[in-house]
Image (tube, rainbow, N blue to C red):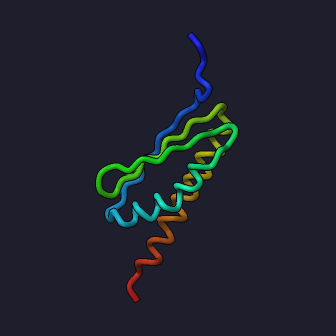
Amino acid sequence: MTESEWPWTATVEVRVDDPTVADWIEQALRPEAAREVPRAHAELKRGRGGSLELSISARDSGAMRAALNTYLGWVHLSLATAKTARKPE
């Protein structure tokens, strides 16, 4: 049995009521997920309606922690921005 190059994996599903907000989050995260990072890899996949799945693979626990913290921070920032942008005047 051979060890995987990316033994640490995590999947985060983000669900929002409005598919447009899911589009915004995807657009914000897609460039970051496409970047090459030596110890971690991320993939985005759209689900039904307002869901977005973020899969992260990492070479070690430190890389996984850093990637999760980073991506969850970006998701939080994207949701806060969308909430502010959608406030009625």
- What residue do we see at 50% from left, 69% from top? 80
**Residue 68, x across and y down, in percent:** 58, 46
- The structure residue drawn at horizontal position 68% and vertical position 37%, both measured from the top left corner, is 39
Q: Quadrant of the C terminus?
A: bottom left
Left or right of residue 72, residue 89 in this image: left
| Quadrant location, the N terminus | top right
Q: How many marks?
A: 0
Most distant residue in the bottom direction: 89
* Residue 83 appears left or right of 58: left
**Front one among 61 and 36:** 36
Task: Say if 49 sits above or below 82 in the image.
Answer: above
**Could you tell me which residue is drawn at 63 percent across and 39 percent down?**
40
**Residue at image location 58% in from the left, 27% down from the top:** 7
Closest to the observer, 6 or 70: 6
Q: In the shown orientation, is residue 88 left or right of residue 35? A: left
* Residue 76 horizontal/vertical position (percent): 52, 61
Residue 42: percent from the left, percent from the top? 55, 43
Task: Estimate the x, y position of residue 57 in percent, counting from the top left.
Answer: 56, 36
Residue farthest top in this picture: 1
